[in-house]
Image (spheres, grey):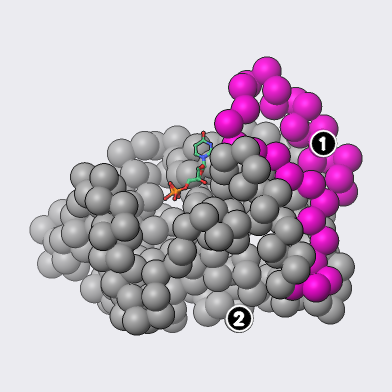
Amino acid sequence: MRDVIDIMGVPIDNVTMGQALEKLENFLSEDGVHMVFTPNSEIMMAARRDPELAQIFKQAHMLVADGAGVVLASKILGTPLPEKVSGYDLVKNSFSIAARRTIRYFLLGAKPGTAETAAKNIMRDYPGVEIAGCHHGYFKPENESAIIDAINRSHADILLVALGAPKQEKWIYKHRNELNVKVCIGVGGSLDVFAGNVSLAPDFFRNNGLEWLYRLYKEPWRFKRMLDLPKFILLAIAKRLRLVK
Ligand code: UDP
């Protein structure tokens, strides 16, 4: 049975990073396509406004808490999640599984050239990881079936989809039955990080729940979107105090 914690209508798996990796490895041995998403506070708020996204999250096979905000909300609600399991760290740690069993990845998304650079860096830094193919994320709908064919011909086990949220979640959901992979993970801006185009927040920010502050400093145009974070926490407090349903 899946152990999930309901955070404002989104069922987040009650897992540590280690347990999330174990689940990911189990998916590789099971039949069917498994959808894995990594919502942060902004995306949790987006799901409140977008019933389609909320439904997709309900049908996912694993949802992990990407961000200190989601973990904080779980504590406020009295149902604490054990830790943050960010999409980037989940993918990076999955490469260590690939060191003992072959896992083939297909990278879909980001600007032209980025997935290829990310693939090169990943293969250099994690020997044993196989990148079965890459495609950028700025394709037209009429090119989708050729991209899906390329993914299926590559015999990838894990498809990393970096189209940003909620585009990647909707894309994976729409095409899940055409894809011949074991796992699809929505990974947001992770390919930019693997490619070295965008740097992760320094450890101090990452370890103290302040990644949002670093991101705001680096990408100030995100300010409006990031207001969802305090709104999300206020909503959790209001829920705990039973001021809203
Ligand atoms: N992206 C893409 N196709 C699109 C829109 C975005 O491939 O049509 C990529 C973009 O280049 C970036 C990633 O999706 O690499 C989104 O990164 P972001 O950090 O914005 O992720 P989010 O915070 O939305 O999850």
Q: Residue at x 21, y 45 (%)?
A: 224
- Residue 222 in the magenta stretch? The answer is no
Q: CA distance from mark 1 to mark 2?
A: 31 Å
Most foreground residue, 130 or 90: 130
Q: What residue type is disc 1 on?
A: Ala
- Where does residue 196 sit, x and y in percent of width and height? 55, 60
Instruction: Please state the extent of the stretch shown in magenta in the rendering.
Output: 126-155
Name the quadrant containing residue 41: bottom left
Q: Circles 1 and 2: CB distance less than 8 Å?
A: no
User: Which disc, if any, is residue 150?
Assistant: 1
1 or 2: tag closer to the N-terminus: 2
The residue positioned farthest toward the top in the image shown: 142
User: Quadrant of residue 110 in the image?
Assistant: top right
Q: Does 83 appear above or below 200?
A: below
Q: Secondary structure at mark 1?
A: helix
Q: Is residue 134 magenta?
A: yes
Q: Is residue 212 above or below residue 15?
A: above
- Mark on residue 18? 2
> What's the residue type where badge 2 is placed?
Gly
- Residue 212 x/y as whole percent: 30, 63
Residue 47 is at least partly visible in this image: yes
Q: Position of residue 231 (x, y in %)?
A: 19, 55
Which of 53 and 6 lies nearest the eye of the viewer? 53
